[in-house]
Amino acid sequence: MSLHSPESISSVQQSVNTAQSVETNQTQTSSERLIRSVHVPFSDEFQFALNHNMFSHLKTRPISKDGSSEREVLFNGRDLTRHNCWEEVRKGRCKENGSLTGTGWEGYFADVISSEERSIKLILIGKKMLQALKSELPFDPAMRTKYINALVKEQWSEDAMRFWNNVFGAEVSVNRSRVNQSPKLQAFRKETEQMVAGLPTPKVISNGNEIIHHYGVVKKPLLTFGSISLSEEDSLALALVKKSGILGSPVTRALLEARV
């Protein structure tokens, strides 16, 4: 199957939609604030590594004293808060517009006036990811498809996820430098951080069989992203952008640091 075939793109987009439908609102405390319970990407791999003591840097503690199997995974609080800020942008700070919102990257374009231009910039991130993949594996389309599926369909591959993690980190660094040069972006970041600071502390819970991530979201839409015509490559690029945020998840990062 070609990297950019209609079948490939349709399958990728379906995987994105399915993964997003897993997220559920557990409690609505007000018209604007939601508490989310999210099944974690790569939770099977993470649970296996946890059960086999493959994390030298992670500990757990019981949730209660009643003999329950549930345990909290003790991540660095700063890592949890950073990811919560990303999720706040992804789920709370943008007015929904189908496939063009809900990526987590939106906050980097709060200084862009045109909603259509914001959408184009989102897709450009995905195109840069695709170009990086083509440069990494120029003569192996089958392996490129495997790398795409590792991210979009959450089919764990350590080599693929390490590659995407490097691409993700480089792109985040580029955009953070823009934030440091833009008062408007700095104000957006500060407001997001203040919103997240008022939410319950994020927790990652293991019951021995699955991993659940509990975190809060304040629904305060601010940014709009205009509808634009998407080519097949645009659709694939957008699918990568929408799933790239899982690379910043504490669970994904822990897996990349696990002892093998």
Image (spheres, helix red, strand yellow):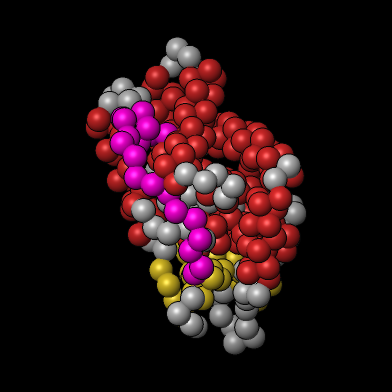
Up-down: is 58 above or below 194? above
Q: Is residue 92 visible?
A: yes
Q: Residue furthest bottom?
A: 66
Q: Main secondary structure of the magenta part?
A: loop
Q: Kindly identify the residue that appears in the image at 44 percent across and 76 percent down.
A: 26
Q: Which residues are magenta?
A: 219-237
Residue 50 in percent (x, y) is at 61, 57
Q: Kindly identify the residue that appears in the image at 73 percent across and 60 percent down.
A: 78
Quick check: is 64 in the magenta stretch?
A: no
Q: Residue furthest top?
A: 139
Camera-nearest residue between 36 and 183: 183
Residue 165 in percent (x, y) is at 60, 37
Q: Kindly identify the residue that appears in the image at 48 percent across and 49 percent down.
A: 103
Up-down: is 129 above or below 182? above
Q: Quadrant of the N terminus?
A: top left
Quick check: is 223 in the magenta stretch?
A: yes
Q: Quadrant of the C terminus?
A: top right
Using residue 230 as the reference point, say whether residue 144 is left or right of it: right
Residue 22 in percent (x, y) is at 38, 61
Up-down: is 6 above or below 249? above
Using residue 230 as the reference point, say whether residue 38 is left or right of it: right
Residue 199 in percent (x, y) is at 62, 74
Camera-nearest residue between 257 and 3: 3
Camera-nearest residue between 200 and 70: 200
Q: Is residue 47 visible?
A: no
